[in-house]
Amino acid sequence: MGGVSAPAGVAVESEEPQARPWHLIVRRKIDAPTEIKYSLGNAPADTPAPRLAFMQGQRYWIEQALQQGKQDVGWGDYPVRGWRGWHHHLALVMMAMLFLLEERLLHQQTRPLLSGTDIRALLNPFLPQRETTLEEVLRQMGVRHRKRQSAIHSAHRNQQVSE
């Protein structure tokens, strides 16, 4: 791996000049001893085991946030091909998620079950709706098709050059 040698059982990233250890975190629930979770961690070698276990446990909350982002604000609906568009999309998604979180916290006492879906449903009647004609839909589709065809041609050219 890039001329890097490492002791047996140590994962190595080939870009690094020397091997560094990874932690294998194995967790199980006390009330469900057959349910075991495994994770690899790249924390510093002297990180205490309880800290590693805590961080692995935070995975649930991160997954919940990602799922909420997909359901409520279109995290998974990015129709972009480049890094700039992807970063712009994620910046807007993060701002929308922050807005939803702030609204939920603001109304926590009066509406404890308020969700992102509820907030969107409440806002929809008040947000401007853009009317789209069939011609506009077809024009946008044509632009997407031209870009897709260009990407296909580019991939074919790159494939022919590498052969």
Image (cartoon, rainbow, N blue to C red):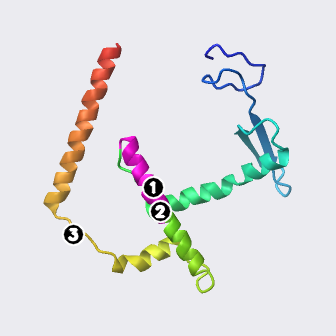
Taking the image as drawn, is residue 105 in sight?
A: yes
Q: Describe the element under mark 1 as helix, strand or loop.
A: helix
Asked which quadrant contains residue 135, the reply is bottom left
* Residues at circles 2 and 1 in contact by the CB criterion of under 8 Å: yes
* Residues at circles 3 and 1 in contact by the CB criterion of under 8 Å: no
Q: Is 35 on the left-hand or right-hand side of 94?
A: right
Q: Residue 47, position in %: x, y?
A: 81, 42
Q: Is residue 92 magenta?
A: yes
Provide the residue designation for mark 3.
Answer: 131
Instruction: Pick the residue in front: 84 or 161.
Output: 84
For the magenta stretch, what is the residue range? 81-96
- Amino acid bearing label 3: Glu
Residue found 45% across the figure and 59% down from its top = 93
What separation in Å lies between label 3 and label 1 (alpha carbons)?
A: 26 Å
Kindly give the residue lying farthest to the right in the view shown.
30
Q: Is residue 110 magenta?
A: no
* Residues at circles 2 and 3 in contact by the CB criterion of under 8 Å: no
Residue found 45% across the figure and 63% down from its top = 73
Above-or-below relation of 126 to 6: below
Provide the residue designation for mark 1.
Answer: 91
Residue density around tag 1, few if under 14, some if 14–19, many if 20 or more, within 10 Å = few
Q: Residue 28, position in %: x, y?
A: 81, 49
- Amino acid bearing label 2: Met
What separation in Å lies between label 2 and label 1 (alpha carbons)?
A: 6 Å
Instruction: Pick the residue in front: 55 or 88.
Output: 88
Q: Residue 30, position in %: x, y?
A: 86, 55
Provide the residue designation for mark 2.
Answer: 95
Q: Residue 46, position in %: x, y?
A: 82, 38
Q: Is 16 on the left-hand or right-hand side of 84?
A: right
